[in-house]
Amino acid sequence: MERLTRRAVTTIRENYQEPLVLDDLARSVMMSKFHFIRVFQRTTGVTPGRFLSAVRLHEAKSLLIHSSFNVADISARVGYSSASTFSRRFTGSVGLSPTQFRRAGRGDTLGDPRIAPAPVAGGAHGSVAGTARTQGRSRHPLYIGLFDSPILQGQPVAWTKLDRAGAYQLQRVPPGMWHLHAVTLGARATGDQWGDSPLLVGTVGPVQVGANGCTRVDVVLRREDWTRPPVLLALPGFGSRPARPRAADGACPAGPHRSEAGFRAPHRRAAAGA
């Protein structure tokens, strides 16, 4: 089943700009639609539609930094039929508007993101504490936060930054179910604050946090692999590399995509989304 899920992920990553639909993705790996959703989510932690959306927004981040296309062109190139819908989803997931993200990536410090937790309502709160460990060397800050999504996106409900792996604590956490995300750069980081760098990531959740108590959550950060949807939240020093090499103007090179042996790409349809 993992092999079939990997084929579906390959389909998404290589054809994200196409109007992919759930039926076609399921058919490409010879599963029923409902069985495909269960298997995909068990392997990646998210539904095929959410994985596709994350890949599209991650590609948009890369185009904003490495191309001169305007926002409307970029939204179309990553599979959106509406530039306003694209901008709204990008801002909500990345934490900056497309224009702000482009300025930040090109050295405009006014657009440099500052992560702030969402306002906390009154009443009793809990806390989360534990240890963050990394598999692999890192000399960069480590970020840990609680989010309402299994994808690292949007605004955290609690957030902290560590100089290195070790003990952490998140205070004033609203009671509820949250996903703990941790991320840092690996040892081979480039000098470009938005350049291509290996990420070490860790996710635990959903985690139940109660009021007036401390929940213990340990997390291990490992190198990103094919099962993980991209990190969308804008953080200085965290790259936005494209899925495939691009020409200087940001266009994808000519020629067919490389795919696994026996892999059949889905048919194109007029409807968008998955």
Image (spheres, grey):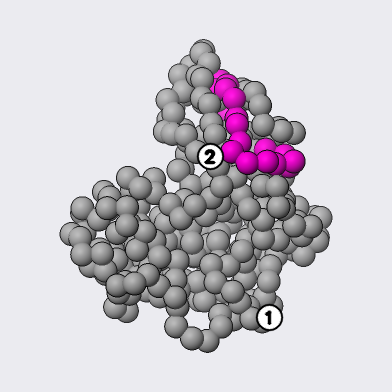
Identify the residue at image location x=50%, y=38%. 203
Tell whether 139 sits left or right of 6: right
Q: Position of residue 233 (x, y in %)?
A: 60, 50
Seen at 48% across and 61% down, the residue is 55
On the image, numbered disc 2 is attached to which residue? 202
- The magenta region covers 115-142
Using the image, tell me which numbered label, if any, was put on residue 58: none
- Is residue 245 at all visible to an observer of this figure? yes
- Badge 1 density bin: few <14, some 14–19, many ≥20, Cα 10 Å: few
x and y percentages locating residue 33 in the rendered image: 21, 59
Residue reaching furthest top?
212
Q: Is residue 172 visible?
A: no
Foreground: 87 or 133? 133
Are discs 2 and 1 less than 8 Å apart at CB? no
The residue furthest left is: 32
Number of marks:
2
Q: Nearer the viewer, residue 173 or 7?
A: 7
At numbered mark 2, what does the secondary structure look like: helix, strand or loop? Answer: strand
Task: Report the residue marked by disc 1.
Answer: 248
Residue 138 on the magenta span: yes
